[in-house]
Image (cartoon, rainbow, N blue to C red):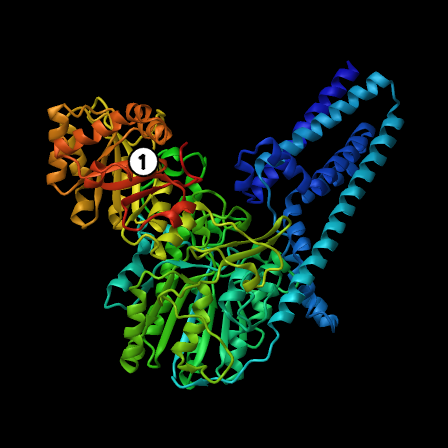
Amino acid sequence: MTAVRRRWGYLLAGVGVLTGMTMAAYLLGIRPSSKELARYNVGRLFEIVSQQQPEYLFLLGICLVAASFLIKRYWVPLVLVTLIAFAWVIYYESVSVWLLGLGADSFSETQKFDLHEALFFIPGMLSIFVPFIAYRRLALYGIAGFFIFSALLVVRRKGNFSGQTTFVFCFLAGLCLTAVALYILSVRATLSYQSNSEIFNRAAKNFDNPAMPLVFNRPLNVVIYLGESTTVMNMGLYGYPRDTTPELTRLAQQDSQVLVFKNVMSTFTHTSDSLLEALSIGLHTNQDLLPITSRTRVSLPDLLAYNHIPSYLLSNQGEEGTWNMAGSIIFKHAQKQYSVDTTRLGNAEYMINRPYDGDFFLKHLDVLIPKLSSANSSVVFLHSFAGHGGMNGYLGAIPKDFYPHVDDYFKNRSDAAIAGTVRGATENIENYDSAIRYVDRTVSQVIEKLSRLENPTVLIYFSDHGESVFTSRGHESSRFTHEMARVPLLVSFNASARLMYPDLFNNYKHLSETTALTTLAQIPATIIDLLGGQVAETALVLPRLIGAPQDAYIPPVLVRRTSSGDTYVNTNNADVHGSAAGASAPATNSADDPTRIFVARQTHLLDQSALCYSAVNTIAMALRGAMVANCLQLDVVANSQGAVPLTVSSASVPGAAIGTVVEIASRNKLSLWLQVRDLKESRFCQQLLALVEPTLSAGQTVLVSLATEIDLSDRNVIGCVQTLRQKGVKTAYSLPSEQWLACAEARGRISSLEREACQPLYAKIDQLVLTDAFTDLSFDYQSLSVVELIVAAKTFRWNAMNVEPRQLLDLDANTFRMVGLKSRDRNALN
């Protein structure tokens, strides 16, 4: 009985430890990490185990040490070891991020370290200890510890080991494992420190170049509002169906107080690399395929300081670390004010508490404005934090007043209808949209404050990079998705600036109305232009202004050096030649399909054709398609109840409601291509007309393409098609791919075989001509060679399906009304 009671005591002790740790986590206010809620495959599991080796080894070791004390019933050491394990679990994330983010710049201020510095250093160091854990991980560790102890009891009983032997073994094995864990962590920290220092020192050296004299002849204050992780995909101002930007939308509609630039891409998807390029000027024109830290450049604040124009930085971000190199490199000659002291925190700075952007900026602008009034010209940089995901999610950097959801848009929609196969994304989307609403409020408040200044002032707002919240990928460059690089760009002239420089205002108003592809690399040229800078007598070569028509060549973005070679995202239709752009080895275009479509559209590759984002079946796909294309293509089926729901090809899983997709198309002034199946009753025509009426009213093209199974001799069907045509809808017949391919394979063979294979196709086209109901033909792009040889087919406009984005260069701009482009979309249902 004593042994049984002892075992039950051990069991209750284990449960008690687990319960105590869980309750302590709850009392400390620790919240689950969204990463822990993701579903991992086996490969991902091994990757996580490899990355978290120190954490797991230390916990295994500490469990063995705790087991040794439990066996000997040394209760005080057991409690101490349990507390150490708990502290390791909740603080490992923050401490490891800090250690792995340290670099040479993290200790640049400790060269003359005295007692006062030490006393100031301690609070800064303590701020890195941020509790962070997921309940699931906590429970997992508790259960693992319990089973380890249970296994030891079994081994001890089966092996007939004494209590002293078991104690010594567990204690020594535990100490060895914890020592190995600490050794691995220290080695990783050392290697990371060396790597981060090398990156920082290389960038600092390449950006440490003498500025050149320029002539500035326009007295003006320029305020640059640097946003954080903000994509146009989630901004109502840019066509998002939720009103996430009510204030900016209002200002944009009020006498052009805010000029909205479209089709803007960041140069990278991480803050440091993006701002290093967006706030500096290249000194050589053949380095476009080098990582930004390896290019020879001069920072814009350095250039301004050399020419006696003061620059100021109000930053709610960190001062150092590889994630914040702009603070140390770009702004070294600016007058800087940070919201919190983040020295010696490296990349861990994002975990500490800081004021909200609006509170910080408005407070310090009140102090700074008198200085602006006394200067002929000046440039102020406001570096914001809201929009950053961080350890507390997207809500961590905004006031609680903005926590509630923007509206009920997603309330009764399934995850599949919103984001396809990406599960659990809806809550992140809701929180991110709330953050965008706060960004809208803060930017608007700054604009309105500057509007009251007597001095002429221009504000430029843009984000360092975007965010892929619908795919749950954030802004990780190795998994690039188009919206990670699609950012807002707004320009606001206050009343004094519009009155004093009307021609300048009108020029930028005109530039904002173009559809030219713009990158953030054009920001420095724009700031210099606003200040009236003259560069004719210098060797400085500036890029074009924001919104200006494209040159023959646009420098690529997202240039990365990886273990498998250099990659970049091409912003041109033609390939970038590595030798002319500084690459030491061939580089690979890593643009995803949506970006390829976007580039083709913005560079007017097929100016006469609508480029359609194909097979749209989720809200995320419709939103992404609206960003990159000028047409959405979707499959529609008429069911027995008379509804017209969206389907996933032949699957039975319903996607987004067709009305939702059509509304997104109408809001963004996109054409529509509806591929309709099972149209057997004329009553569906009225439903189709009601659906597409907003698109037709907006002057956009609507193409209804009927699938091959319809009966061309059915008067009801033909009457339906004729009704659609009379209402302005373009009507197409989708010719069967099998017939096209059979005819194509038979061409060039014996004439009788060719006639036999192609006759059904010829007869079908002749029948279509006689119906006088169809305006177009739609067919698979592989069939083009056959269609081109059929005389009767030329009486119709053509529409190509299943075109790869890479094949756009081969298409004739005048051949097609619409081109359905394949896109491997992360949010597709199939």
Residue 816 seen in the figure: yes
Task: Give the quarter of the figure containing the N terminus.
Answer: top right
Judged from the image, the secondary structure of the residue bearing numbered disc 1 is helix
Between 721 and 739, which is closer to the camera in this rendering? 739
What residue sits 27% from the left and 52% below the top? 608
Residue 677 in the image: state x and y as whole percent: 25, 28
Between 768 and 651, which is closer to the camera in this rendering? 768
What residue sits 50% from the left and 48% below the top? 480
How would you rate the neighbour count of disc 1 (Cα within 10 Å): few for under 14, some for 14-19, many for 20 or more? some
Residue 402 seen in the figure: no
Position of 696 compared to 421: left or right? Answer: left
Between 532 and 445, which is closer to the camera in this rendering? 532
Dividing the picture into quadrants, the one containing residue 655 is top left
Residue 336 in the image: state x and y as whole percent: 54, 73
Q: Would you place residue 451 above or below residue 570 in this image?
A: below
Task: Give the quarter of the figure containing the C terminus.
Answer: top left
Dividing the picture into quadrants, the one containing residue 661 is top left
Position of 132 compared to 708: left or right? Answer: right
Q: Would you place residue 355 above or below residue 505 in this image?
A: above
What residue sits 64% from the left and 55% below the top? 128
What residue sits 52% from the left and 66% below the top? 277
The residue type indicated by label 1 comes to Val
Q: Would you place residue 573 above or below residue 724 in this image?
A: below
Residue 694 in the image: state x and y as whole percent: 18, 45
Residue carrying label 1: 786
Between 565 and 390, which is closer to the camera in this rendering? 565
Residue 563 in the image: state x and y as whole percent: 64, 49
